[in-house]
């Protein structure tokens, strides 16, 4: 069954107030923006995940790669926005969750000792990063956790933009993926960890970086997704689902205007109208 927007449905317009970025060769938005704008030459390198120092020591010891990357980018985006982290509703989205933790659980189940560590178990749930974010920031606002496989970033953006407009509030969007060890890597070959966070708001401010609009009649399209002009960045975009955000971040870095088309579902992409602030 095909759904159609209601007649006269208003566009979903949001303003980008803060960005967090961490991935191969991308240690944060400050340098990432320069790589995306071709102001500095980009070179891929293994992602370096900082310790989540905002967590209490016990939780810090239990934190896996998805927690480290999601907290790092979330904190960067929130600090840049100036919004209180504890008051922002959030949307967390990932194509695979904690891939390394999944590997360890499968390895234990395939061994003679099939007992699963309690830490492994509670890190296996898809909302683990959201929970650790709430612990680290004291956030009591609603948090949504999504998965749409390779279309997870676009699904998260749709959800976050809808919440911004419906509830007239700022929303934190965090998208992340981690790499599987072998043998799962052979069927899900994600090469590294990548995370991005965005603070989206309903109103423009002096700190706004960009304006993004999802028009109900045109945002779902069969037009091919935009590729990155830089070969290495395009390889990254294609390899890790969370990195499908890169064309959108490129438009922010270059103060671009027009339409950016992102990968979403098979045969269906997400068109975002972008403008600088």
Image (cartoon, grey):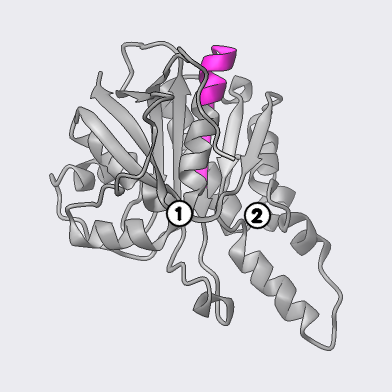
In the rendered structure, does residue 168 fall within the stretch colored magenta? yes
Instruction: Report how far apart the C-alphas of labels 2 and 1 lie in the structure.
Output: 33 Å
| Residue 162 seen in render | yes
Residue range in magenta is: 162-175
**Going 72% across and 75% down the picture, which residue do you hit?**
106
Of the 4 image quadrants, the one containing the C terminus is top left
Residue 194 image point, x, y percent = 44, 54
Of the 4 image quadrants, the one containing the N terminus is top right
Residue that lies at the very extreme toward the bottom in this rendered image: 112
Residue 10 image point, x, y percent = 45, 14
| Residue 55 seen in render | no
Residue 78 image point, x, y percent = 48, 28
Of the two numbered discs 2 and 1 on the same chain, state the one appearing first in sequence: 2
Please tell me the numbered disc located at residue 43: none
Above or below for 8 versus 153 = above
In the rendered structure, does residue 206 fall within the stretch colored magenta? no
Please tell me the numbered disc located at residue 63: 2
> SS for tag 2?
loop
**Going 31% across and 58% down the picture, which residue do you hit?**
25
Please tell me the numbered disc located at residue 266: 1
Q: Of tags 2 and 1, which is closer to the observer?
A: 1
Horizontal side of residue 238 vs 77, given as left or right? left
> SS for tag 1?
loop
Q: Nearer the viewer, residue 100 or 187?
A: 187
């Amino acid at each position: 069954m095909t759904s159609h927007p209601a007649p006269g449905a208003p566009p979903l317009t949001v303003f980008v107030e803060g960005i967090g970025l961490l991935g191969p060769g991308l240690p944060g938005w400050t340098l990432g923006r320069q790589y995306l704008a071709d102001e500095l030459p980009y070179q891929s390198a293994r992602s370096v995940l900082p310790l989540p120092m905002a967590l209490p020591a016990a939780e810090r010891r239990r934190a896996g790669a998805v927690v480290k990357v999601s907290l790092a980018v979330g904190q960067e985006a929130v600090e840049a926005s100036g919004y209180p982290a504890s008051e922002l509703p959030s949307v967390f989205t990932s194509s695979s969750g904690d891939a390394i933790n999944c590997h360890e659980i499968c390895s234990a189940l395939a061994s003679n000792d099939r007992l699963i560590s309690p830490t492994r178990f509670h890190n296996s749930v898809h909302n683990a990063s959201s929970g650790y974010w709430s612990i680290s920031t004291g956030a009591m606002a609603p948090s949504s956790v999504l998965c749409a496989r390779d279309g997870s970033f676009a699904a998260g953006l749709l959800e976050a933009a809808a919440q911004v407009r419906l509830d007239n509030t700022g929303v934190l969007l965090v998208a992340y993926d981690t790499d599987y060890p072998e043998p799962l890597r052979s069927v899900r070959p994600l090469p590294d960890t990548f995370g991005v966070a965005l603070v989206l708001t309903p109103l423009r401010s002096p700190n706004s970086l960009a304006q993004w609009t999802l028009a109900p009649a045109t945002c779902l399209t069969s037009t091919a997704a935009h590729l990155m002009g830089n070969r290495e960045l395009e390889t990254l975009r294609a390899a890790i689902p969370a990195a499908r955000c890169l064309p959108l971040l490129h438009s922010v870095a270059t103060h671009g205007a027009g339409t950016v088309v992102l990968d979403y579902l098979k045969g269906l992409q997400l068109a975002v109208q972008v403008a600088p602030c």
